[in-house]
Amino acid sequence: MVKKNASIFISGKGTNLKNILNKSIDYTFPIRVKLIVCSSRYAKGLVFAKQRSIPIFIIQNNLISQMKLINEINKRNISIICLAGFMKILSKSFIRALNLRILNIHPSLLPKYKGLNTYERIKKNKEKKTGCTVHFVNEKLDSGKIILRKYFYISPNDDFKVLKYNTQKLEYLAYPEAIYKLFRYN
């Protein structure tokens, strides 16, 4: 199998990054991570990139930084970007400039609860089930074509911490499954 070069974008702890890195060791996993992009030089998740000697790019919220990142992505022959807890919105010009697949994992069953504060909104609306969605990124927030969803039922006693924990457990299954699915048919 010829693996595709990937870039993972993070902002925080990097637990989905760690999960994808661990999966990428498997020879059947269709991607190899060649670049980590982060919105903060202090993000805890960068430790996983450093442990594996994967280059890191800290992106600033300006056009010059975005142009430099596009050059880095092209230089490294990246063919897929996985947003994994990346808390910045990619600009339309950035998305248009890259002719490649950009995936995101969102902590709700899209199209419900796009954007931020999902757990609070789920609790407020007394949802019976929730989960996560892996989808393509387009120019509208959390509106790209859905690749897959995974869900669980919510107990009335579940607080935000339990919702987040249960959702993240599903994310660790869903993201690799979506990546396999994406490359299985291409």
Image (cartoon, rainbow, N blue to C red):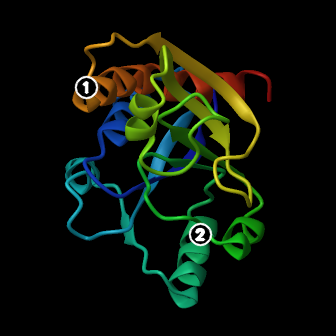
Tag 2, which secondary structure? Answer: helix
Where residue 29 appears, as percent x and y from the top left, is: 52, 25
Q: Quadrant of the C terminus?
A: top right
Q: Give the answer, above or below, for where 128 lies relative to 145.
A: above
Name the residue tied to disc 2. 75
Please name the residue that numbered disc 1 is placed on. Answer: 159
Which mark is in front, 1 or 2?
Answer: 1
Question: Whole-percent x and y of residue 121?
Answer: 45, 38
Q: Residues within 10 Å of mark 2 (few under 14, many from 20)?
A: few
Question: Which SS class for mark 1?
Answer: loop
How many numbered marks are there? Answer: 2
Marks 1 and 2 close (CB-CB < 8 Å): no
Measured Cα–Cα span from mark 1 to mark 2:
45 Å
Of mark 1 and mark 2, the one earlier in the sequence is: 2
* Quadrant, the N terminus: top right
The circle on residue 90 is none
Q: Nearer the viewer, residue 17 or 22?
A: 17
Q: Residue at x 57, y 44 (%)?
A: 104
Quadrant housing residue 183: top right
Relative horizontal placement of residue 141, taking residue 32 as reference (left or right): right
Q: Is residue 108 above or below residue 73?
A: above
Give the farthest residue toward the bottom: 64
Quadrant in the rendering for residue 17: top left
Image position, residue 120 (x, y; %)? 38, 39
The amino acid type found where label 1 is placed reads Asp
Q: Is residue 145 left or right of residue 27?
A: right
Question: The disc labelled 2 sits on which kind of residue?
Answer: Lys
